[in-house]
Image (spheres, grey):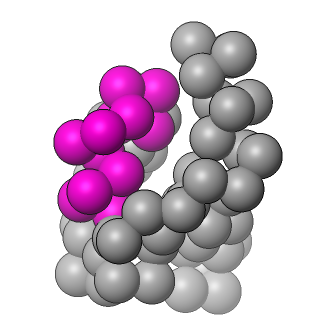
Amino acid sequence: MIGEVNAMQEGKTYRDLFTMLREEPAAKAYFENLPAPVRQQMSTRAFRVNSFESMRDYADNLTRGDG
């Protein structure tokens, strides 16, 4: 999984969060391990998430309360 995550971090982008989750098992695994409120908030703004890096950054912001 680390190799898959590293490949995603190299700048591959997707149409939105749901496309990325469908196409990248490592991204789906990361998403599924986030707290439920973070997953819910992220899902309501799926268009803002188009890469693994943007998902990780958004999750960090939400868990800090900056979302």
Q: Residue at x 23, y 59 (%)?
A: 18
- Report if residue 46 is visible in the image: yes
| Quadrant in which the N terminus appears | top right
Q: Nearer the viewer, residue 14 or 67?
A: 14
Quarter of the picture holding the C terminus? bottom right
Vertical side of 33 occupied by 61: above or below: below
Camera-side residue: 43 or 47? 47
In x, y percent, where is residue 51?
A: 55, 60
What is the magenta segment's predominant secondary structure? helix
Looking at the rendering, which quadrant does residue 17 occupy?
bottom left
Is 60 in the magenta?
no
Q: Position of residue 31 (x, y in %)?
A: 39, 43
Residue 47 picture location, percent across and down: 34, 83
- Does 21 lie within the magenta span? yes
Q: Tell me which residue sits at (48%, 69%) in the image.
A: 50
Stretch in magenta:
17-28
**Is residue 35 rendered to the left or right of residue 4?**
left
From the viewer's perspective, is 6 left or right of 26? right
In the picture shown, does residue 67 fall above or below 55?
below
